[in-house]
Image (cartoon, helix red, strand yellow):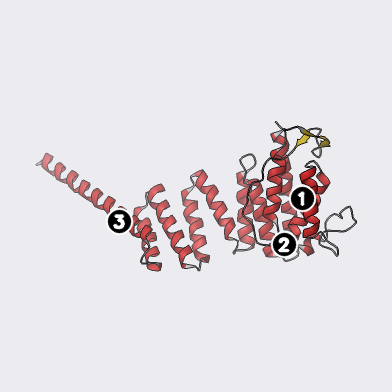
Amino acid sequence: GPAPVRGLAHEGTSRPLLRPKARVTIRRLPRPQLGAVLARGRPTPRGRGIGQRGAIVDHDISQLEEALEANPGDVEALRRLEGGMVEAGRLSDLLTWFEGWTAGFEDPDTARDTWRRLGERLEKRAEAATADGLKESAAELLFAAGTVYDRPTLDSDQAMVFYQQAFKTDTRMTQALEAARALYVKQGAWPMVVRLLDLQLQGARDADVRVALLVEQGRVLADEMGERDDAQQAYQRALEVDPDCVAATEALGRLEEVSETWADGVDRLEAEADAATS
């Protein structure tokens, strides 16, 4: 594998760091306004608190990115980069950097603990944002914390808690519902999947979005739960929004075929039973 970065080690360990592998693209989140929250943060080496006058700006972030590309083991630069990206609303960029940075760790436990500490810091920032009345920012930070924990090596239950808190804090945070639904799909918790689809439908105003949610709800009800009557209702609601929806029309056709086949089978069994007893 690649050679360790000489003379530098991960914070709190004696293990050397490795240069990170290629970055992983993560969906960009909206840009929150976190200056008031981060103004209370730890001063940078320049003696300036992030969010205060003279705060880290995009130019500084670019310099820190270059510094970390040259020296991935610079823990202080990474911490300053974290604060700057959070303030700038570049949470997806922050997660991308951590993805690349921890990919080169020799010890998977060290990488896992590093991600966990990031999640804890994001949670604290969310608490501060909530205290300052910045609900949108708090929701975005909670969603980012959920994304951190929603990793194979961390804690999906904790991720679910953060996703729920994010949506509760700001009901416009539909990304949190989608992420929570994806976790329930992995777990096979289909009633909860249907419930979250209902929640998304309550807030969905776009016709195409509503149709897509209703078709997915019908699929889950029919294919995963065997609730054909409820599935038919979901597909019919989709057709009320868009009468030309091919997916809903075809799905309803399949359900009707199954129902007719089942009814024919029942009729045959009853006829055979009557014949046997006569």
Q: Are marks 1 and 2 in contact (CB under 8 Å)?
A: no
Q: CA distance from mark 1 to mark 3?
A: 55 Å
Horizontal side, residue 3 vs residue 196: left or right: right
- Say what secondary structure mark 2 lies in: helix
Query: Which residue is the site of mark 3?
Result: 253
Of residues 8 and 21, the one nearer the viewer is: 21
Q: Position of residue 18 (x, y in %)?
A: 75, 36
Residue most toward the left? Answer: 278
Horizontal side, residue 131 vs residue 169: left or right: right
Nearest to N terminus: mark 1 or mark 2: 1
Q: Position of residue 1 (x, y in %)?
A: 70, 31
- At label 3, counting other C-alpha atoms closer than 10 Å, the crowd grade (few under 14, some 14-19, many 20 or more) is few
**Is residue 112 at least partly visible in the picture?**
no
**In the image, residue 62 above or below residue 187:** below
Eye-nearest disc, 1 or 2: 1
Q: Position of residue 183 (x, y in %)?
A: 55, 48
Q: Residue at x 60, y 45 (%)?
A: 156
**Residue type pointed to by label 2:** Thr
Nearest to N terminus: mark 1 or mark 3: 1
Horizontal side, residue 209 vs residue 20: left or right: left
Q: Residue at x 28, y 55 (%)?
A: 256
Horizontal side, residue 10 vs residue 214: left or right: right
**In the image, residue 262 above or below residue 7:** below
Q: CA distance from mark 1 to mark 2?
A: 29 Å
Q: Are marks 2 and 3 in contact (CB under 8 Å)?
A: no
Task: In the rendered structure, find residue 130 and report the number of the disc placed on it.
Answer: 2
